[in-house]
Image (cartoon, helix red, strand yellow):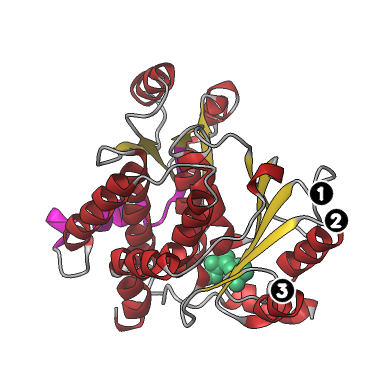
């Protein structure tokens, strides 16, 4: 487990990371012509894009303009001078994000960059684009606090959405309470994340969510299992999965026995979705020979509920790596691919 220490340590420090980011943002001004903003578009990939997903989930309902996330080289056709494009890349060297940044600039979009350095920081400085510089030295996916909090703070400072200080406080407190229960020192009998890792060991995880609050979190679980535990995992959401995926559970038993379903749920889920989750898990899948369990978010506010599930998933994916005898930190395949593409 020694090799796992880095990733597990970074997960443990999530509340401190968020506090540091809040502090950084207190000293950061936002210069933006808010009246011109018709769309907010966050552009990034992988562990950096997840911050955008979390933001969209958390404030999408109250923001008067759409918040969208773009994961690619180009900008959608609507992007122009009424779009606020936030380019986010932890390393600052992701080619898709740099390409999207250039296209946004060429279209006259209002730009902001969030990065720990690299080419994106250089270009932002060169172009006079507002730059949020976050601390370096982590894996991007382990820097979720450094990436999400500045995004949230930027849209709050722009005046487009209200600041919800109490919800942030509740979230930080909940994460501090939960992490000792989930940390490596907590025995399996009392450690939900270790129990989940045991359930997922040797299985293909299917992470289910609602289209509302938990969707970005289920996708985070999928990608964390991919990158930390270096195994396949898939995510899908209600109600859509009721219209296709449930039919797929009729696969032959040697396949279905390899599947472990975890359904994430939240009190913010639509009441009909809550009913769908419960009926699907207990009745529709009653005879399916896959493992299955439901995991309810903790906390009161939407932010606390999102992050409670995120923390459990981050820990569970790192413990799954340990069960497979792997170091959860390096992502050798991603690095090799980047070299091949160079
Ligand atoms: C690695 C990770 C990756 C990266 C992605 C983009 O920990 O999370 O998904 O986030 O390769 O790189 P950045 O985030 O540096 O733009």
> Can residue 228 be seen in this snapshot?
no
Quarter holding residue 110: bottom right
Residue 248 relative to residue 214: left or right: right
User: How far is the residue under mark 3 from the one under mark 2?
Assistant: 16 Å
Residue 333 relative to residue 321: left or right: right
Identify whether 112 is placed above or below 10.
above
Q: Where is residue 117 shown, x and y percent of the image?
A: 60, 80
Q: Are marks 2 and 1 in contact (CB under 8 Å)?
A: yes
Is tag 3's residue or tag 2's residue first in the polypeptide sequence? 2
Query: Which residue is denoted by mark 3 in the rendering?
Result: 128
Between marks 3 and 2 in the image, the one whose residue lies nearer the viewer: 3
Q: Residue at x 45, y 37 (%)?
A: 208
Helix, strand or loop for disc 1 = loop
Is tag 2's residue or tag 1's residue first in the polypeptide sequence? 1
Helix, strand or loop for disc 2 = loop
Q: Where is residue 200 shown, x and y percent of the image?
A: 37, 52
Q: Quadrant of the C terminus?
A: bottom right
Residue 78 relative to residue 190: left or right: right
Q: Residue at x 34, y 33 (%)?
A: 266
Helix, strand or loop for disc 3 = loop
Query: Which residue is denoted by mark 1 in the rendering?
Result: 80
Does 201 lie within the magenta span? yes
Does 80 lie within the magenta span? no
Query: What range of the chain is rendered magenta?
Result: 187-208
Query: Which residue is denoted by mark 2 in the rendering?
Result: 107
Q: Where is residue 64 shown, x and y percent of the image?
A: 58, 34
Q: Does the residue labelled 3 lie within 8 Å of ligand 1?
A: no
């Amino acid at each position: 487990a020694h090799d796992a220490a880095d990733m597990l340590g970074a997960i443990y420090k999530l509340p401190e990371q968020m506090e540091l980011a809040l502090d950084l943002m207190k000293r950061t001004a936002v210069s933006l012509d808010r009246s011109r903003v018709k769309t907010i578009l966050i552009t990034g990939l992988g562990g950096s894009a997840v911050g955008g997903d979390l933001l969209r989930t958390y404030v999408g309902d109250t923001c008067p303009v759409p918040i969208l996330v773009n994961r690619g080289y180009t900008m959608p056709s609507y992007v122009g001078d009424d779009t606020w494009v936030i380019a986010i890349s932890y390393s600052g060297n992701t080619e898709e994000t740099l390409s999207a940044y250039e296209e946004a600039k060429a279209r006259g979009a209002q730009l902001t960059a969030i990065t720990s350095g690299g080419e994106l920081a250089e270009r932002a400085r060169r172009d006079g684009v507002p730059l949020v510089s976050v601390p370096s030295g982590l894996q991007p996916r382990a820097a979720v606090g450094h990436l999400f909090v500045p995004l949230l703070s930027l849209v709050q400072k722009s005046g487009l959405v209200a600041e919800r200080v109490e919800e942030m406080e509740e979230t930080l407190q909940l994460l501090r309470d939960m992490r000792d229960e989930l940390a490596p020192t907590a025995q399996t009998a009392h450690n939900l994340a270790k129990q989940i890792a045991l359930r997922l060991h040797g299985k293909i995880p299917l992470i289910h969510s609602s289209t509302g609050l938990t969707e970005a979190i289920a996708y985070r679980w999928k990608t964390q299992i991919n990158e930390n535990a270096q195994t396949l995992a898939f995510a899908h959401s209600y109600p859509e999965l009721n219209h296709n995926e449930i039919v797929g559970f009729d696969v032959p038993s040697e396949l279905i026995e390899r599947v472990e379903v975890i359904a994430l749920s939240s009190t913010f889920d639509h009441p009909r979705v809550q009913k769908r989750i419960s009926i699907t898990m207990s009745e529709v899948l009653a005879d399916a020979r896959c493992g299955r369990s439901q995991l309810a978010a903790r906390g009161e506010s939407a932010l606390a509920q999102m992050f409670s599930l995120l923390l459990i998933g981050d820990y569970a994916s790192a413990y799954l790596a340990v069960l497979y005898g792997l170091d959860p930190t390096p992502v050798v395949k991603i690095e090799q691919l980047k070299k091949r593409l160079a």
